[in-house]
Image: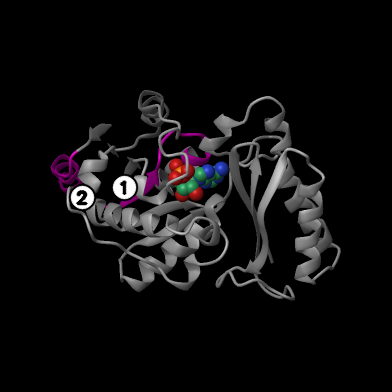
Amino acid sequence: MEIAIDLDKLWAIRSALPGTWGLVPTMGYLHEGHLSLIRRAKAECDHVAVSIFVNPTQFGPSEDLSKYPRDLERDLRLIEPLGVDVVWNPTPEIMYPSGYQTWVEVEALTKPLEGAIRPSHFRGVTTVVAKLFNAVQPHKAYFGQKDAQQAAVICRMTRDLSYPIKIVVCPIVRETDGLAMSSRNKYLEGADRQAALVLSRALTAAKALYDAGERDAEKLRARMKEVIAAEPRAQMQYVSCADYDTLAELETVTGKTLLSMAVMIGKTRLIDNFVLG
Ligand code: AMP
């Protein structure tokens, strides 16, 4: 496994190995969710690149960029047995050289949900992912359903910019008690860890209503809000029952539907989702 920081080294490694390449973009502090993406890439591609880059442009001014957990040595130890060809760990200066002024923006899909609460977030995500695509030139790129809107936005960007890359969206990996794995779970201490189960509990409750035949989207949203309101350590940011493709809020559930939410547990912001239909 090679480790590249600058673009020249990355490109030397990339161009020396013919065959199909899979890319797994991450911000590091890896967990089983990330590793599931890497294993899938390894199973489907001749070569795999993993990027580890805490992308400053996707964090808002009051967000946790400086506190975001980092441990490159631990990440490399976790990746090593998986047969990855190259780990790319660029610096912010390599990704955003002095005078940087070029951005990639997806319009309508980035406006609701996460975009409504984190206004410049997706501009940072799409810009960095476009740069990763240009640098690695993968045949396939792997993203998690955990960040459902991000996956939808990347699929849109890939189509709109004619990247010859297949986007593979992989299922959410959860702890045995239902908490969706996330690097930010590290922040959950004491009673917050237990309180964080409210997200999967609210989604499960809405899904139970759906399974019992409920198709009124407002009733599904109300059920999720009710479960979250019952947890004193939880502060809801949004709950959504939206069309899977457009992310527009629904009145009636008919086709593929995304139930999603963002909830503050103490100072930690968590997101989770389920797909219906
Ligand atoms: P991050 O390092 O948080 O930017 O995540 C890198 C990639 O891993 C993204 O495509 C995420 O959606 C994905 N990911 C994060 N958590 C999970 C999880 N619990 N299950 C599956 N994929 C995940």
To which residue does mark 2 refer?
A: 18
Residue drawn at (45%, 32%), measured in percent from left and top?
67
Residue drawn at (73%, 75%), measured in percent from left and top?
251
To which residue does mark 1 refer?
A: 46
**Which of the 4 image quadrants contains residue 222?**
bottom right
Q: Is residue 197 left or right of residue 68?
A: right
Whole-percent x, y for residue 213 in the image: 84, 68
Whole-percent x, y for residue 150 in the image: 48, 57
User: Would you say residue 220 sits in the magenta stretch?
Assistant: no
Let me know if residue 37 appears in the view: no
| Image quarter hosting the C terminus | bottom right
Range covered by the magenta-colored residues:
6-34
> What kind of residue is marked 2?
Pro
Q: How many marks?
A: 2
Let me know if residue 223 appears in the view: yes
Q: SS class of the residue under badge 2?
A: loop
Q: Nearer the viewer, residue 82 or 131?
A: 131
Mark 2, residues whose alpha carbon is within 10 Å: few (<14), some, or many (≥20)? Answer: few
Q: Nearer the viewer, residue 9 or 262?
A: 262
Residue drawn at (45%, 57%), measured in percent from left and top?
168
Q: SS class of the residue under badge 1?
A: loop
Mark 1, residues whose alpha carbon is within 10 Å: few (<14), some, or many (≥20)? Answer: some
